[in-house]
Structures are given as C-alpha cells and as structure tokens.
Amino acid sequence: MKQQEFTNLLNKYLGGTADAQEQQTLINYYNALQENNSGWSEDELGIENDVRQDLLNKINNEITFIEKKTKSKRTQWLSIAASLFVIIGLGSYFLVNPNKILKNKKLAQVSIKPGGNKAILTLDNGKQIILNEAKNGEIARQDDIVITKTEDGKLVYNIMENNDNVAEVQAYNTITTPRGGQYQVSLPDGTKVWLNAGSSLKYPAKFAYDQRTVELKGEGYFEVAKDKSKPFMVVTTNQKIEVFGTHFNVNAYDDEPAVKTTLLEGSVKVYQASTFISKFIKPGQQAILTAKSFNIQDVDVEEAVDWKNGVFSFNEKENIKVAMRKLARWYDVEMDYEGDFNDISFGGSFSRFSDITESIKILESTNKFKCKIVGRRILIKR
C-alpha cells in the first residue's frame, strides 16, 4: 500500500466515511504487517514520525468532537466512537514503536478475548443453570412464573396469564456474572437490570404485595418499572436505595473504596446503612458512599453507564489502578504493578470488544507506562 492510499484510507476511516470493504482493507493490511513482522517502510508510507503525529492529531480531534456533543445526543455518537476506537487500536500500532511490538513474541502470541454474555442462574431450590450454554426458550418454571432465555441473551420472568396473586412464601433466585461476563434480566414486574462482570443480583421470583427488594453485589444498571404502591429497593453493602420508577447505575464492588450510585432520570433516596442517614439525588448526580463519608456530586452520567453500551470510559482524574480494575474484570485477568502509580491518571474511551492486546496498546500510547502479558497476568511498569 502506497503512502497516499494509506493516508486516504485512514482519513476516511477516522471521518466515518469508509465503507465495509475499505475498513476491511485497512484491517487486513494491519494484520499483514503483524504476521509478516515487517517494519515501517518510509518509501511506501512516508516518514514514520510525521504519520504518527498526524494520526494522533486526527484521533484527538475526533474524540474532542464527540465529547463536545450534548448529553442528549451522546448515545447516537457511541456507534461512531466505537468505530473510532477500533482504529485507535489499529493506529496504536503506529503510535508506539511498531518493531518493538512485533518482536515481542509473548505479546503477539497471547490472545485474551473480551467478555460476553455469560451468567449462572441459581434457583431457589439450589439448581444452577449456565445461561450461556442453555438453549433459547423456556428454561425453568416456579409455580406460576415462566423463566425464558431470549435469542439476544436476556433472562425474562413472566407471570402466567390471569394469575397475579402474590406468593405466600417468596422464592429467591440469584443471577451471577463471572469475571469476563455480563447479562441482562427482566424481572417479574418489568424492571430491567444489566449486570456488569463479576456481579450478582438476588431477587424474588415474584415480588411481595407491598415492596420490591433486590440485593446487588458488583455493578448493575436499573430501569425500574413504575409502581407507586410498591417501592423498589436495591440493597448493597452498607447502602440501601429506594426508588419508584427511574434509571440509575450502582457500582458496589467489594474491591472499590466507595459505592457509587448515579442517577440518569427520576429520583432516588440513598440510605447509609450504618448511620441511617439518607439523601436524595437528582438526575446528573452521583452519591458516593465510603466507610467515612457520604457525599453527592454532579457528574457526567453517561460515563457511568458506558460499560453497558460497550465502551470503556475514563475521566481525566481516574487513577490508573481504578481503570485497570475495570479491564481486569472484563477480560478476566490479574494486574501486577512495578513502580509508583499514585500520581498516574488516565482519561479516554475505547471499545470493550477489542482483544486485550489492542486495549493495552491504546493505554501504552499515553507513554505513562508499559505493559507485559504473561498468561492471564498483566505486568504494568513505569
């Protein structure tokens, strides 16, 4: 591929005008460079540093352009951003030293794929169903409740027609996502819940007559069905959330220093379990609960739920170890650190559906650290 052709193709890809064939041509060319262990050819591609800087400028401009869009339009840009993040992954081959990457055989040989729709459903009687292996359709019944797995990887609870009586004794089910897994469940009242990797949700197969209570570990995004007669409660470690009908995200991993509840719409009341102190949060706000504090702050709410839209999103102040824990859960890997990372933060976004080597190249392009893959462990060095 000659320099002009290469430049034109990159420009079209970054501008979102490359068709499927042109995108595939660029990907095939990149893969061929890796497979053939060929280095940069200035005769064909131009001066490496000039191309690298030009590509970096274009990427930064595109990211800035996306970030300037209003929140109401941000969702429609996710597909554009996701496409852009793929080329960032490709572009990082040129942004860092290509020969060094290609000669690192351990890095090239390791293929750690992203997570996917994986979960285990544990019924009240102890029976476990591996959802990613179960066939689509009805997978279980509990009295008048039919549990169905849909073609697009969702778990749906349906109350049989003409039977809306409340169960005398509640049967509790638990859906658990492993590291490297995610899943969506539609509860008997119509509430939708998205579970992130390494999470679990315990809930009754049929809600009581006066309230709807679930227990969350890890991270979940909720779209609660409205029912003023039955408040919806989410219980986590040291926290309880009361809602009537709203959209919100809860990050309550045990290995995180704070439980974060982010409200997109509606109104919720957050209780600190140890003190019974409660606070209301409004759309665009986040409740941050630690062992010593309970604060409310304004945030970019879309950033908190990008994970369910297939994007890793980090703000400029996010500590690198916090960012790496997100990757560790999704790719099911362990992280080791060599050096002091207390003053290192990372800002940016990229697709959750890339091979981990591509994600690492993007992170390394910040020139703040280097990574080495050994099995399913990532060594991060300053």
Image (cartoon, rainbow, N blue to C red):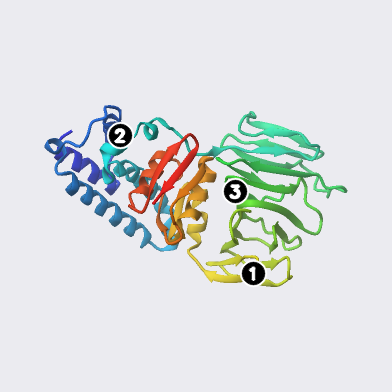
Q: Which mark is residue 292?
A: 1
Q: CA distance from mark 1 to mark 2?
A: 48 Å
Q: Quadrant of the N terminus?
A: top left
Q: Is residue 20 visible?
A: no
Question: Relative to the observer, which residue lies in front, 4 or 362?
Answer: 362
Dot placed on the residue nearer the N-terminal end, 1 or 2 = 2
Q: Is residue 51 visible?
A: yes
Badge 1 density bin: few <14, some 14–19, many ≥20, Cα 10 Å? few
Is disc 1 placed on a helix, strand or loop? loop
Q: Which mark is residue 223?
A: none
Is disc 3 placed on a helix, strand or loop? strand
Q: CA distance from mark 1 to mark 3?
A: 29 Å
Q: Residue furthest front?
A: 339
- Which residue is drawn at the image coordinates 34% and 53% (left, top)? 366
Residue 20 x, y percent position in the rendering: 32, 36
Is disc 2 placed on a helix, strand or loop? helix
Q: Quadrant of residue 140?
A: top right
Q: Amino acid at mark 2?
A: Leu
Badge 2 density bin: few <14, some 14–19, many ≥20, Cα 10 Å? some
- Which residue is drawn at the image coordinates 35% and 43% (left, top)? 89
Between circles 1 and 3, the one closer to the viewer is: 1
Between circles 3 and 2, the one closer to the viewer is: 2
- Which residue is drawn at the image coordinates 71% and 53% (left, top)? 215
Residue 50 x, y percent position in the rendering: 17, 49
Q: Which mark is residue 194?
A: 3
Q: Residue furthest right?
A: 168
Dot placed on the residue nearer the N-terminal end, 3 or 2 = 2
